[in-house]
Image (spheres, coloured by chain):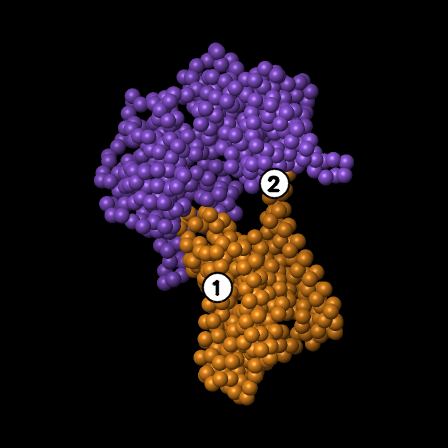
Chain colours: A orange, B purple
């Protein structure tokens, strides 16, 4: 091969790389826009304000979990126990409320318990050296089992929960016309956005996923930072649990089953690399909206829920293939 | 087998690594390939074995033009490359490693253990070696693993064996048996390309030598026609005296002292100290415990016992963050693995140890960060198209300067540099030496671990020499001290 040819080829590949990385940055937003256009064309009521607010409210629970999952995946880890943490903290909170603890206090304790559960994951992974996949797979079944033990397998509900103002407000309330769960999601997004992109904690998170050894030698407390990241995931899961029990006015022992999949899907759709080190929490927000739009849109159009699962799976595969393209 | 490489050129981006290089390997000879780090030796060998493809030039094997699309094709043609870092699977047995991906199968498609054992033992016999085929290879010494690599090469019927720094981690008796095997195989018609920095060894084993510098071949001659001095001068391109900057030493008070430091099976009873403005060199063979001591001081690895004191006070350092708080910086020997996050930008890498200094009201201050990084890039003359360029795309020298920028930015008062100029081109090397002088002028204490003897002699004020986990001596580095003196200590007092 002549030198000129080689140079031409390498500059082409640089351009290609640039093109794909720009595309990948815009990709999630672009995908969302396309999805919205298609859905609107098939059923124009999709764009009704009420439907959009409804969509956002549906997204809020997955969004909260996925924000926490973003931190975990940025370090190259995974947290499969989010759905089970949601169920366990919901059940414990509901039990506290039905036995007379003031609702808001019970919720605060519930969220703290979520943090502790996440911390357990973190310690097993950092101190114990277990792979995040296995560690959180094990705690997933433990937390789920504990939920069944505490609830005896029955839903927890009661008049207190139905009548509680806090429940009414969080579950069904509006604030300036916006559903409260949506406000909670947005506030959480802002806080976590600042944590990830404006504070040292975020730089450490990225560094862990980029090259853990180099991060360690650079003085980052790897174990502590990682443990805190799993604590965040626990807190976000239990916060999502609080929203869920407020909406249902009850805690279901099987709540949150499969939620880990939607959360991981949102993170990946948002362009975060499963290998860690690369991604943005804004992408996760868009990813969650894509999944929400798919669910909401397919319901509006009248696609059976069986097919919906297939479509969601295909969308995720496409996203992952694009991610591979980007890292190649 | 004869191999001729003619007019080989290779560049990575704008970086021309090889320019019109010729290399001629004859039948049944040991051909030494020498040159400084970054001279292009490895690139040339990677082109010969098809790992890289040249931008220009031809490769002829026994007069026939060839083009290998990868090491496998080169191996089939009879050219084997034994890399410095051997690709062994430590948990797997000697036998499994020998036949990895080349397993012999019986007619049922199952692995034929019996035939493989026979074949392995036959090869061992021709090499006059003997190893337990069922032992996990990781339990063998590096020297033994090297012998097994050679066996592997012989199994593929190699006619040319390339060895990259084969003796770097060997004891002197292992070196002797390696040389015996090399001579033995040479008699049977095998040619060797022997890449090494150790001139004394090359004078012993090689028939001819090719010297490379800055991507050119500067000399090809018979060993009998040349001398150590001539080779060194050709490698560096000038007298060594001019190559290293002169040091003016103003030593202050002791800043770091280490007493009776131990790590089980790694190093024993290490005591030394280093003063403000001083460069303490650490010499010794690979695996002698130099790097491990530094890792223990910095808290990367645990120590078994012993104390580290800073400014006379004993400090507890259990992880790097604590070492950094005490003002220590650590440039690790492997910058791609532990020094840098290659996918991240220059800026993101530089700020890592200094994150807490760039914060205003808990928020990372973008402007402070940009100014901080800009200042360091200028001060260290890191050649980059901007601070947001990914560090992996920079040349080795500029990557190394980025690592140094991290620690200078963190305000380290004690800098541990492990192989600071490895894989760095000659120009950047000089800049790094100048920087070291500049730092010591301002009172920074430097500990420099290096396998590069001329570098250790020229830059250090005192030299600590390690041998098999023991600190043999700390000697003043003056004009009378020679490489041979250091080598004697580093090989346990016996001359090679």
A51 vs A222, nearest the viewer: A222
Which residue sits furthest top?
B225
Q: Residues within 10 Å of mark 1 (few under 14, many from 20)?
A: some
Res. A243 image quadrant: bottom right
Q: How many marks?
A: 2
Up-down: is B118 above or below A55?
above
Chain bearing tag 1 is A
* Secondary element at image label 2: helix
The numbered mark at residue A11 is 2
Coordinates of residue A288 in the picture (x, y in percent): 60, 66
B5 vs A74, nearest the viewer: A74
Q: Residues within 10 Å of mark 2 (few under 14, many from 20)?
A: few
Coordinates of residue A56 in the picture (x, y in percent): 60, 73
Work out whether residue A234 can be spotted. Answer: yes
Work out whether residue A8 can be spotted. Answer: no
Which residue sits furthest right?
B107
Residue at image position (40%, 58%) is B365
Mark 2 vs mark 1, CA separation in Å: 49 Å
Residue at image position (67%, 70%) is A295
Res. B128 image quadrant: top right
* Secondary element at image label 1: helix
B451 vs B428, nearest the viewer: B451
Q: Give the residue number, with chain letter if any, for mark 1.
A: A120
Residue at image position (58%, 39%) is B92
């Amino acid at each position: 091969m002549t030198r000129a040819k080689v140079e031409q080829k390498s500059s082409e590949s640089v351009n290609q790389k640039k093109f794909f990385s720009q595309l990948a940055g815009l990709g999630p937003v672009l995908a969302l826009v396309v999805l919205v256009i298609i859905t609107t064309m098939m059923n124009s009521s999709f764009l009704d304000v009420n439907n959009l607010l409804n969509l956002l409210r549906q997204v809020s629970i997955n969004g909260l979990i996925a924000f926490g999952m973003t931190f975990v995946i940025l370090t190259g880890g995974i947290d499969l126990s989010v759905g089970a943490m949601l169920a366990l903290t919901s059940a414990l909170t509901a039990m506290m409320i039905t036995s007379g603890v003031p609702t808001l206090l019970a919720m605060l304790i519930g969220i703290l318990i979520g943090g502790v559960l996440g911390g357990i994951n973190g310690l097993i992974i950092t101190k114990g050296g277990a792979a995040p996949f296995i560690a959180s797979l094990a705690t997933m079944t433990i937390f789920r089992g504990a939920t069944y033990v505490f609830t005896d397998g029955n839903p927890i509900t009661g008049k207190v929960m139905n009548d509680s103002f806090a429940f009414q407000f969080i579950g069904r309330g509006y604030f300036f016309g916006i559903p409260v769960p949506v406000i909670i999601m947005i506030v959480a997004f802002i806080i976590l956005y600042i944590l990830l992109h404006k504070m040292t904690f975020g730089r450490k998170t990225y560094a862990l996923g980029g090259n853990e050894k180099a991060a360690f030698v650079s003085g980052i407390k790897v174990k502590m930072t990682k443990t805190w990241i799993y604590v965040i995931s626990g807190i976000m899961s239990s916060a999502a649990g609080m929203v869920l029990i407020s909406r249902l006015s009850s805690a279901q022992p099987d709540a949150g089953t499969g939620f880990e999949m939607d959360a991981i899907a949102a993170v990946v759709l948002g362009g975060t690399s499963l290998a860690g080190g690369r991604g943005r929490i804004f992408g996760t927000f868009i990813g969650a909206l894509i999944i929400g739009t798919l669910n909401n849109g397919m319901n509006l159009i009248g696609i059976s829920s069986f097919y919906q699962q297939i479509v969601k799976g295909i969308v995720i595969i496409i996203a992952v293939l694009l991610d591979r393209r980007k890292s190649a | 087998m004869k191999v001729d490489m003619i007019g080989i050129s290779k560049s990575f981006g704008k970086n021309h690594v090889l320019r019109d290089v010729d290399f001629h390997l004859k039948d049944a000879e040991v051909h030494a390939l020498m040159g400084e780090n970054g001279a292009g030796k490895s690139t040339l060998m990677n082109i010969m074995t098809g790992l890289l493809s040249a931008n220009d030039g031809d490769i002829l094997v026994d007069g026939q033009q060839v083009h290998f699309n990868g090491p496998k094709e080169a191996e089939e043609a009879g050219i084997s490359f034994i890399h410095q870092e051997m690709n062994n699977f430590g948990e797997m047995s000697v036998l499994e490693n020998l036949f990895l991906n080349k397993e012999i199968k019986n007619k049922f498609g199952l692995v034929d253990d019996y035939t493989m054992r026979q074949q392995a033992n036959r090869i061992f016999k021709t090499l006059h070696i003997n190893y337990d085929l069922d032992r996990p290879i990781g339990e063998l010494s590096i020297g033994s693993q090297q012998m097994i690599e050679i066996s592997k090469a012989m199994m593929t019927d190699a006619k040319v064996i390339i060895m990259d720094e084969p003796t770097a981690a060997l004891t002197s008796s292992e070196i002797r048996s390696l040389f015996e095997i090399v001579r033995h195989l040479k008699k049977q018609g095998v040619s060797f390309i022997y890449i090494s920095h150790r001139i004394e060894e090359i004078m012993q084993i090689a028939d001819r030598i090719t010297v490379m510098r800055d991507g050119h071949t500067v000399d090809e001659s018979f060993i009998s026609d040349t001398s150590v001095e001539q080779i060194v001068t050709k490698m560096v391109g000038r007298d060594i005296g001019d190559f290293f900057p002169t040091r003016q030493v103003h030593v202050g008070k002791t800043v770091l002292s280490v007493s009776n430091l131990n790590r089980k099976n790694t190093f024993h009873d290490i005591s030394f100290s280093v003063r403000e403005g001083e460069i303490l060199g650490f010499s010794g063979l690979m695996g002698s415990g130099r790097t491990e001591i530094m890792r223990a001081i910095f808290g990367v690895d645990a120590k078994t016992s012993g104390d580290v004191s800073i400014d006379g006070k004993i400090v507890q350092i259990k992880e790097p963050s604590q070492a950094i708080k005490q003002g220590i910086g650590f440039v690790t020997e492997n910058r791609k693995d532990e020094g840098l996050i290659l996918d991240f930008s220059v800026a993101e890498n530089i700020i890592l140890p200094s994150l807490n200094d760039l914060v205003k009201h808990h928020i990372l201050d973008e402007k402070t960060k940009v100014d901080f990084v800009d200042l360091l890039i200028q001060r260290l003359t890191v050649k980059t198209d901007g601070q947001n360029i990914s560090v992996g795309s920079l040349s080795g020298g500029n990557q190394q300067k980025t690592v140094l920028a991290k620690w200078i930015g963190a305000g380290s008062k004690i800098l541990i540099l492990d192989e600071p100029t490895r894989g760095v081109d000659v120009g950047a090397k000089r800049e790094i030496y100048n920087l070291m002088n500049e730092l010591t002028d301002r009172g920074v204490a430097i500990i420099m671990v290096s396998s590069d003897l001329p570098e250790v002699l020229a830059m250090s004020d005192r030299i600590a020499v390690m041998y098999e986990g023991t600190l043999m001596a700390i000697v003043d580095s003056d004009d009378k001290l020679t490489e041979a003196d250091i080598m004697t200590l580093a090989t346990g007092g016996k001359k090679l």
